[in-house]
């Protein structure tokens, strides 16, 4: 159970709204690390995946919006090519 709790993060958008998300996966792409997050308040079947840059600095880690639209599009295209086992939790 403790491991499952570690996969839950709270993110805050630019309007100050907080959302709890499950860290679905962390991927490496084009020499950067990205986190794939699933909001917990939405139906998992229809829920929208949130893609953010994942940054580690020493013992600290945080998420950052992908400001470059072309970079965001490339990451999203790459994510769509990934295959996940539907039974995977």
Image (cartoon, rainbow, N blue to C red):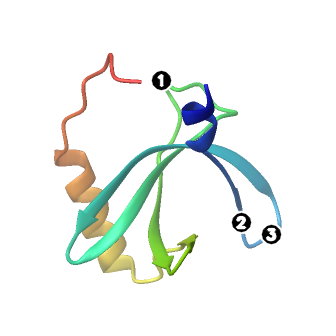
Mark 2 residue crowding within 10 angstroms, few (<14) / some (14–19) / many (20+): few
Q: Is residue 21 left or right of residue 58?
A: right
> Which SS class for mark 3?
loop
Q: Position of residue 29 (x, y in %)?
A: 22, 68
Q: Tally the marks.
A: 3
For image coordinates 72% across by 49% down, the residue present is 19
Q: Quadrant of residue 32?
A: bottom left
Mark 2 element type: loop
Disc 3 target residue? 15
Contact between labelled residues 2 and 3, with CB atoms less than 8 Å apart: yes
Q: What element does badge 1 sit on? A: loop
On the rendered structure, is 84 left or right of 64?
A: left
Q: Depth check: 39 or 57 in front?
A: 57
Crowd class of label 1 (few under 14; some 14 to 19; many from 20; radius 10 Å): few
Estimate the spatial distance between the alpha carbons at disc 3 and disc 1, rounded to whole Å. Answer: 26 Å
Question: Which disc is residue 13 wearing?
Answer: 2
Which residue is depicted at the point 44% across and 70% down?
A: 53
Distance in Å between CA atoms under marks 3 and 2: 5 Å
Q: Residue 70: x, y in percent?
A: 30, 78
Q: Which residue is mark 1?
A: 45
- 3 or 1: tag closer to the N-terminus: 3
Q: Quadrant of the C terminus?
A: top left
Please provide percent x and percent y for residue 42: 64, 31
Would residue 17 appear left or right of 66 to someone viewing this image? right
């Amino acid at each position: 159970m403790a491991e499952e709790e570690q996969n839950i993060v709270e993110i805050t958008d630019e309007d100050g709204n907080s959302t709890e998300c499950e860290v679905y996966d962390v991927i490496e792409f084009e020499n950067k690390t990205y986190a794939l997050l699933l909001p917990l308040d939405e139906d998992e079947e229809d829920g929208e995946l949130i893609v953010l840059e994942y940054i580690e600095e020493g013992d600290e880690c945080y998420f950052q919006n992908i400001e470059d639209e072309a970079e965001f599009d490339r990451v999203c295209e790459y994510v769509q090519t990934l295959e996940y086992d539907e039974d995977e939790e």
